[in-house]
Image (tube, rainbow, N blue to C red):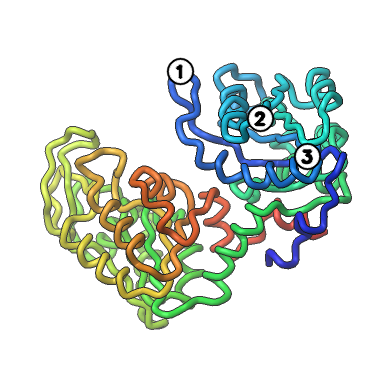
Amino acid sequence: MADALPGLDQLDAAGRRVLVRADLNVPLTDTGEVADDFRLVAVVPTINRLRQAGARVILMSHLGRPKGEVVESLRLAPVAGRLASLLETDVRYARDTIGEEARATVADLADGEVALLENLRFEPGEKANAPDFAAELAGLGEVYVSEAFGAAHRAHASTVGVPAVLSQHYAGDLLAAEIRALSRLLDAPESPFVAILGGAKVSDKIEIIQSLLPRVDHLLIGGAMCFTFLAATGGSVGASRVEEDQIETALSLLDQATEQGVEIHLPTDIVAASDFAADADHRVVPADDIPAGMMGLDIGPDSAEAYAAVIAGASMVLWNGPMGVFEWAAFAAGTEAVARAVAENGGYTVIGGGDSAAAVRQMGLASAMSHVSTGGGASLEFLEGKDLPGVEALKN
């Protein structure tokens, strides 16, 4: 699919105002500093490529969920500062998106310089994809480049409205790399193909499971979603989170896997806790016999070892979703074991963004993976086989 999109090789950027929709939605500390610059680092090569080509680079992004209003704690000033450090050049920051300051900042740019507009979601027209807002954004530039894979599943003004106005629109190198990496999983699966899925809800993963079943050989289930599967197979899961309305769906997915020759692996042991708290009393118990009043917060050591053995034999691995509440040390061992197994695999390994990406970065293992996606929700929808509005807009 990436080959079907117009790319930066086709762009003559010299002296032109290039609007770049980036995904600079990064976590901030309580003191307003960038806590994790993974997404900023990822877009730096494209910014530098455009600068070196003589473009006047105008960055735009959202941050958090301000719901169409100005929220002081969600201004992009800290992002501008961190980007300036990464780029080793000044980043001019406008405290509005389409207002007087934005227009003046853009007008004052010289070739090779960079500006950053204020948080797009301060404007209600962004999420509404309002034509007038899209037109005013587009008016700031001459060319549009999409590097926001993490927002490509949203039909917002900056992702679909602007490229509808600016006839010259291109996929950035990062967006194209994301599509190539994820497309390989769907279009050219290599056996044995192991998919690892975690997270809270079966309902969030139904479509990706159905999309993967014709392609994978093994499906490893962790996170809170495993308890719905365990309950469906008759296990006692104590106070663990179970989606009662998804029991039949879980059984159906297990049957589909059997019919298609896919082995679904469920935990055999669980780290169960007395309460949902970092310092809760906890112990390892059988996965199908969790004591009443206790809840599972991680896969157990036997399950982690078994999952690692399956991963070791894979030619291709996809991981989306942690095995437990990895942010708390007492319940991080399962996620850490899976992360290390994927890092040591040696085959084609893809981390599908979100918490899994955060986990491998936290452990210093991101560089050992073939691809770590910058988009959690976007990568999930892509792997479900859905068209992403922000990608489709570049084809027209």
- Residue 156 lies, with reference to residue 99, above or below; the image says below
Left or right, 197 with respect to 160, comes to: left
- Indicate the secondary structure of the residue bearing disc 2: loop
Q: Is residue 304 above or below residue 166?
A: below
**What is the CA distance from the residue labelled 3 to the residue labelled 1?**
30 Å
Q: Is residue 228 left or right of residue 376?
A: left
Q: Which mark is residue 100?
A: none
Relative image position of residue 391 (x, y in whole percent): 70, 55
Q: Nearer the viewer, residue 28 or 66?
A: 28
65 lies left or right of 48: left
Q: Earlier in the sequence, mark 3 or mark 1?
A: 3
Residue 12 in sight in this render: yes
Note whether 339 is above or below 141 in the view shown: below
Q: Residues within 10 Å of mark 1 (few under 14, many from 20)?
A: few
What whole-number distance in Å separates the C-alpha atoms at marks 3 and 2? 18 Å
Q: In what quadrant of the picture does the N terminus appear?
A: bottom right
Residue to which mark 1 is pinned: 31
Say what amino acid the circle numbered 2 marks.
Thr
Q: Nearer the viewer, mark 1 or mark 2?
A: 2
Q: Which quadrant holds the C terminus?
A: bottom right
SS category of the residue bearing label 3: strand
Q: Which residue is mark 3?
A: 19
The numbered mark, 3 or 2, whose residue comes first in the sequence reads 3
Q: Amino acid at mark 3?
A: Leu
- Residue that carries the numbered disc 2 in the rendered image: 89
**Residue that appears at 56% across and 63% down:** 181
